Amino acid sequence: MSSQSACEACGEGRELPVAIAMAFQPIVDLDQGGVFAWEALVRGADGASAGSVISSIAEDRMYAFDQACRVTAIDTAASLRMQQTLSINFLPNAVYQPENCIRRTLAAARRADWPVERILFEVAEREYVSRPEHLLGILDAYRSMGFRTAIDDFGAGYAGLNLLAQFQPDLVKLDMALVRGIDGDRARRTIVDHGTRMCTELGVAVVGEGVETRDEAAALRDLGIDLQQGYLYARPQLGALPEFRLAA
Protein backbone atom coordinates (compact mmCIF):
# COMPACT_ATOMS: atom_id res chain seq x y z
CA MET A 1 0.00 0.00 0.00
CA SER A 2 1.31 3.47 -0.82
CA SER A 3 1.98 6.10 1.84
CA GLN A 4 -0.99 8.12 0.63
CA SER A 5 -3.29 5.09 0.71
CA ALA A 6 -2.13 4.23 4.21
CA CYS A 7 -2.91 7.75 5.45
CA GLU A 8 -6.34 7.56 3.86
CA ALA A 9 -6.96 4.20 5.53
CA CYS A 10 -6.12 5.66 8.93
CA GLY A 11 -8.44 8.60 8.47
CA GLU A 12 -11.40 7.02 6.76
CA GLY A 13 -13.27 6.39 9.98
CA ARG A 14 -14.48 2.98 8.78
CA GLU A 15 -15.14 0.63 11.64
CA LEU A 16 -12.84 -2.29 12.33
CA PRO A 17 -14.35 -5.77 11.95
CA VAL A 18 -14.16 -6.28 15.72
CA ALA A 19 -14.69 -3.87 18.59
CA ILE A 20 -11.55 -3.45 20.68
CA ALA A 21 -10.82 -2.69 24.31
CA MET A 22 -7.71 -2.48 26.47
CA ALA A 23 -6.52 -4.65 29.33
CA PHE A 24 -3.84 -3.27 31.63
CA GLN A 25 -0.92 -4.94 33.38
CA PRO A 26 1.55 -3.15 35.66
CA ILE A 27 5.29 -2.88 35.31
CA VAL A 28 6.29 -2.68 38.96
CA ASP A 29 9.26 -0.90 40.48
CA LEU A 30 10.42 -3.07 43.36
CA ASP A 31 12.92 -0.48 44.52
CA GLN A 32 10.25 2.23 44.84
CA GLY A 33 7.51 -0.17 45.89
CA GLY A 34 4.91 0.84 43.34
CA VAL A 35 3.86 0.86 39.70
CA PHE A 36 6.32 2.26 37.18
CA ALA A 37 3.97 2.02 34.19
CA TRP A 38 0.85 0.28 32.93
CA GLU A 39 1.03 -1.64 29.67
CA ALA A 40 -2.09 -1.45 27.50
CA LEU A 41 -2.84 -4.79 25.85
CA VAL A 42 -5.42 -5.01 23.09
CA ARG A 43 -8.39 -7.30 23.58
CA GLY A 44 -11.76 -7.75 21.97
CA ALA A 45 -14.54 -5.79 23.66
CA ASP A 46 -15.88 -9.21 24.69
CA GLY A 47 -12.51 -10.18 26.17
CA ALA A 48 -11.21 -12.03 23.10
CA SER A 49 -7.43 -12.50 23.05
CA ALA A 50 -5.03 -10.21 21.23
CA GLY A 51 -4.24 -13.00 18.80
CA SER A 52 -7.89 -13.48 17.96
CA VAL A 53 -8.38 -9.75 17.42
CA ILE A 54 -5.30 -9.31 15.24
CA SER A 55 -6.15 -12.34 13.12
CA SER A 56 -9.46 -10.69 12.20
CA ILE A 57 -7.77 -7.55 10.84
CA ALA A 58 -7.03 -7.56 7.12
CA GLU A 59 -3.63 -6.30 6.03
CA ASP A 60 -5.10 -3.17 4.44
CA ARG A 61 -6.76 -2.29 7.76
CA MET A 62 -3.68 -2.78 9.94
CA TYR A 63 -2.89 0.94 9.75
CA ALA A 64 -6.31 1.90 11.08
CA PHE A 65 -6.04 -0.85 13.71
CA ASP A 66 -2.75 0.52 15.03
CA GLN A 67 -4.23 4.02 15.25
CA ALA A 68 -7.38 2.75 16.97
CA CYS A 69 -5.32 0.87 19.57
CA ARG A 70 -3.35 4.00 20.47
CA VAL A 71 -6.43 6.17 20.83
CA THR A 72 -8.34 3.52 22.80
CA ALA A 73 -5.39 3.06 25.17
CA ILE A 74 -5.15 6.79 25.90
CA ASP A 75 -8.89 7.31 26.27
CA THR A 76 -9.25 4.31 28.57
CA ALA A 77 -6.23 5.24 30.71
CA ALA A 78 -7.59 8.76 31.14
CA SER A 79 -11.04 7.45 32.10
CA LEU A 80 -9.39 5.28 34.78
CA ARG A 81 -7.48 8.30 36.13
CA MET A 82 -4.18 6.54 35.62
CA GLN A 83 -1.34 8.50 37.23
CA GLN A 84 1.65 6.57 35.92
CA THR A 85 3.18 6.16 32.48
CA LEU A 86 1.04 4.49 29.82
CA SER A 87 2.89 1.93 27.72
CA ILE A 88 1.48 1.36 24.21
CA ASN A 89 2.61 -1.28 21.74
CA PHE A 90 2.87 -0.10 18.15
CA LEU A 91 3.30 -1.72 14.76
CA PRO A 92 6.25 -0.11 12.92
CA ASN A 93 5.05 -1.41 9.58
CA ALA A 94 1.82 0.53 10.12
CA VAL A 95 3.76 3.79 10.30
CA TYR A 96 4.76 5.35 7.01
CA GLN A 97 5.63 8.89 8.08
CA PRO A 98 5.94 9.29 11.87
CA GLU A 99 5.06 12.98 11.85
CA ASN A 100 1.80 12.27 10.00
CA CYS A 101 0.87 8.94 11.58
CA ILE A 102 1.25 10.35 15.10
CA ARG A 103 -1.42 13.02 14.62
CA ARG A 104 -4.32 10.98 15.97
CA THR A 105 -2.23 9.97 18.98
CA LEU A 106 -1.37 13.60 19.72
CA ALA A 107 -4.99 14.65 19.28
CA ALA A 108 -6.14 11.94 21.70
CA ALA A 109 -3.50 12.99 24.23
CA ARG A 110 -4.58 16.64 24.01
CA ARG A 111 -8.24 15.69 24.36
CA ALA A 112 -7.47 13.58 27.44
CA ASP A 113 -5.00 16.15 28.85
CA TRP A 114 -2.38 13.38 28.80
CA PRO A 115 1.28 14.59 28.72
CA VAL A 116 3.28 13.01 25.91
CA GLU A 117 6.17 12.34 28.31
CA ARG A 118 3.86 9.89 30.09
CA ILE A 119 3.50 7.77 26.94
CA LEU A 120 5.97 4.95 26.37
CA PHE A 121 5.93 3.33 22.94
CA GLU A 122 6.97 -0.33 22.87
CA VAL A 123 8.08 -2.18 19.76
CA ALA A 124 8.69 -5.92 19.70
CA GLU A 125 12.18 -6.86 18.54
CA ARG A 126 10.85 -9.46 16.12
CA GLU A 127 8.80 -6.71 14.40
CA TYR A 128 11.69 -4.67 13.05
CA VAL A 129 14.26 -7.18 11.83
CA SER A 130 13.44 -6.70 8.14
CA ARG A 131 13.30 -2.87 8.18
CA PRO A 132 15.73 -1.52 10.78
CA GLU A 133 16.24 1.86 9.07
CA HIS A 134 12.50 2.48 9.03
CA LEU A 135 12.20 1.72 12.74
CA LEU A 136 15.18 3.91 13.60
CA GLY A 137 13.47 6.81 11.87
CA ILE A 138 10.27 6.23 13.85
CA LEU A 139 12.08 5.95 17.18
CA ASP A 140 14.14 9.07 16.51
CA ALA A 141 10.99 11.00 15.58
CA TYR A 142 9.08 9.82 18.66
CA ARG A 143 11.95 10.80 20.95
CA SER A 144 12.11 14.26 19.37
CA MET A 145 8.38 14.66 20.10
CA GLY A 146 8.88 13.89 23.79
CA PHE A 147 7.66 10.27 23.89
CA ARG A 148 9.61 7.55 25.67
CA THR A 149 10.54 4.36 23.86
CA ALA A 150 11.14 0.70 24.66
CA ILE A 151 12.27 -2.44 22.84
CA ASP A 152 10.01 -5.32 23.86
CA ASP A 153 10.97 -9.01 23.72
CA PHE A 154 14.65 -8.05 23.70
CA GLY A 155 16.73 -11.11 22.90
CA ALA A 156 14.02 -12.88 20.91
CA GLY A 157 15.00 -11.61 17.46
CA TYR A 158 18.17 -11.22 15.47
CA ALA A 159 18.82 -7.48 15.29
CA GLY A 160 18.64 -6.44 18.94
CA LEU A 161 22.30 -5.59 19.51
CA ASN A 162 22.61 -3.90 16.13
CA LEU A 163 19.61 -1.71 16.90
CA LEU A 164 20.89 -0.97 20.40
CA ALA A 165 24.19 0.19 18.91
CA GLN A 166 22.33 2.69 16.73
CA PHE A 167 19.55 3.76 19.08
CA GLN A 168 19.38 3.61 22.84
CA PRO A 169 15.74 3.55 24.00
CA ASP A 170 14.64 4.43 27.50
CA LEU A 171 13.92 0.78 28.26
CA VAL A 172 14.51 -2.74 27.03
CA LYS A 173 12.15 -5.49 28.14
CA LEU A 174 13.87 -8.84 28.32
CA ASP A 175 12.14 -11.59 26.41
CA MET A 176 10.31 -13.84 28.82
CA ALA A 177 12.20 -16.87 27.52
CA LEU A 178 15.31 -15.41 29.17
CA VAL A 179 13.43 -14.85 32.43
CA ARG A 180 11.70 -18.23 32.62
CA GLY A 181 13.52 -20.37 35.17
CA ILE A 182 16.44 -17.93 35.43
CA ASP A 183 16.85 -18.78 39.10
CA GLY A 184 17.99 -22.29 38.20
CA ASP A 185 19.75 -21.67 34.88
CA ARG A 186 23.37 -20.50 34.91
CA ALA A 187 23.42 -19.69 31.19
CA ARG A 188 20.35 -17.45 31.42
CA ARG A 189 21.73 -15.68 34.49
CA THR A 190 25.03 -15.04 32.74
CA ILE A 191 23.38 -13.68 29.59
CA VAL A 192 21.01 -11.44 31.52
CA ASP A 193 23.79 -10.28 33.86
CA HIS A 194 26.05 -9.16 31.02
CA GLY A 195 23.14 -7.70 29.04
CA THR A 196 21.94 -5.69 32.02
CA ARG A 197 25.38 -4.27 32.72
CA MET A 198 25.73 -3.34 29.05
CA CYS A 199 22.37 -1.55 29.07
CA THR A 200 23.24 0.26 32.30
CA GLU A 201 26.43 1.58 30.73
CA LEU A 202 24.35 2.81 27.78
CA GLY A 203 21.84 4.52 30.07
CA VAL A 204 19.03 2.09 29.21
CA ALA A 205 16.81 0.69 31.95
CA VAL A 206 15.97 -3.05 31.92
CA VAL A 207 12.60 -4.67 32.63
CA GLY A 208 12.27 -8.35 33.44
CA GLU A 209 9.11 -9.53 31.65
CA GLY A 210 7.05 -12.65 32.22
CA VAL A 211 7.95 -13.08 35.89
CA GLU A 212 5.84 -15.87 37.39
CA THR A 213 7.66 -17.07 40.51
CA ARG A 214 9.27 -15.51 43.56
CA ASP A 215 12.52 -17.25 42.72
CA GLU A 216 12.60 -15.67 39.23
CA ALA A 217 11.89 -12.28 40.78
CA ALA A 218 14.63 -12.69 43.36
CA ALA A 219 17.15 -13.80 40.73
CA LEU A 220 16.39 -10.72 38.64
CA ARG A 221 16.76 -8.44 41.65
CA ASP A 222 20.13 -10.05 42.40
CA LEU A 223 21.15 -8.96 38.89
CA GLY A 224 20.01 -5.39 39.55
CA ILE A 225 16.65 -5.58 37.74
CA ASP A 226 14.03 -3.88 39.91
CA LEU A 227 11.56 -3.17 37.10
CA GLN A 228 9.54 -6.33 36.60
CA GLN A 229 6.28 -7.45 34.98
CA GLY A 230 4.37 -10.69 35.03
CA TYR A 231 1.65 -12.84 36.54
CA LEU A 232 3.47 -12.87 39.89
CA TYR A 233 2.42 -9.25 40.33
CA ALA A 234 -0.87 -9.04 38.42
CA ARG A 235 -2.66 -10.49 35.44
CA PRO A 236 -3.97 -8.11 32.75
CA GLN A 237 -7.45 -6.85 33.55
CA LEU A 238 -9.89 -5.68 30.91
CA GLY A 239 -10.88 -2.04 31.19
CA ALA A 240 -9.45 -1.63 34.69
CA LEU A 241 -6.22 -1.24 36.63
CA PRO A 242 -5.80 -4.54 38.47
CA GLU A 243 -4.71 -4.79 42.06
CA PHE A 244 -1.07 -5.76 42.19
CA ARG A 245 1.13 -7.35 44.81
CA LEU A 246 4.80 -6.70 45.40
CA ALA A 247 5.54 -10.34 46.04
CA ALA A 248 9.30 -10.13 45.52
Image: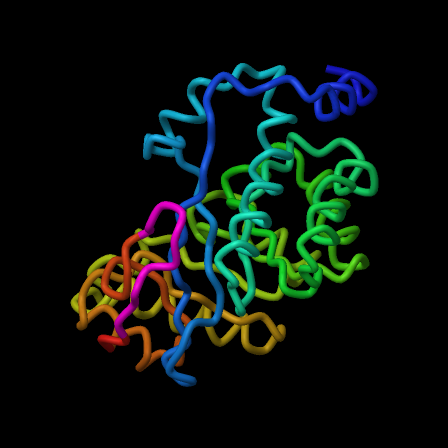
Whether the magenta-drawn stretch holds residue 241 is answered as yes
155 relative to 132, above or below: below
Examine the image and state in which quarter residue 89 appears: top right
Picture layout, residue 108 above or below residue 81? above
Quarter holding the C terminus?
Answer: bottom left
Horizontal and vertical percent position of residue 230: 30, 59
Q: How many marks do you count on the picture? A: 0
76 falls in the magenta region: no
Horizontally, residue 81 falls left or right of residue 112, namely left
Place residue 170 in its image quadrant. bottom right
The front one of 33 and 208 is 33
Q: Please tell me whether residue 37 is drawn above or below residue 55 in the rendered image.
A: below
Q: Which residue is drawn at the image coordinates 40% and 77% (left, top)?
A: 34
Task: Residue at 82% x, 37% y: name it.
Answer: 100
Task: Report the residue at 32% width, 34% height from top.
Answer: 47
Colouring: rainbow
- Residue 21 appears in which quarter of the rendering? top left
- Given residues 8 and 180, the one toward you in this image is 8
Locate residue 211 relative to residue 122 in the image: left or right.
left
| Dominant SS in magenta | loop
Q: Specify whether 47 is left or right of 161.
A: left
Image quarter (top left, top right, bottom left or bottom right) of the N terminus? top right
Residue 145 in picture, x, y percent from top left? 79, 57
As drawn, 22 above or below 215: above
Q: Is residue 9 left or right of residue 120?
A: right
Residue 224 percent across, percent down from the top left: 40, 80
- Identity of the residue drawn at 40% across and 47% down: 239
Q: Give percent across and percent down for residue 131.
A: 66, 34
| First to last magenta residue range | 236-245
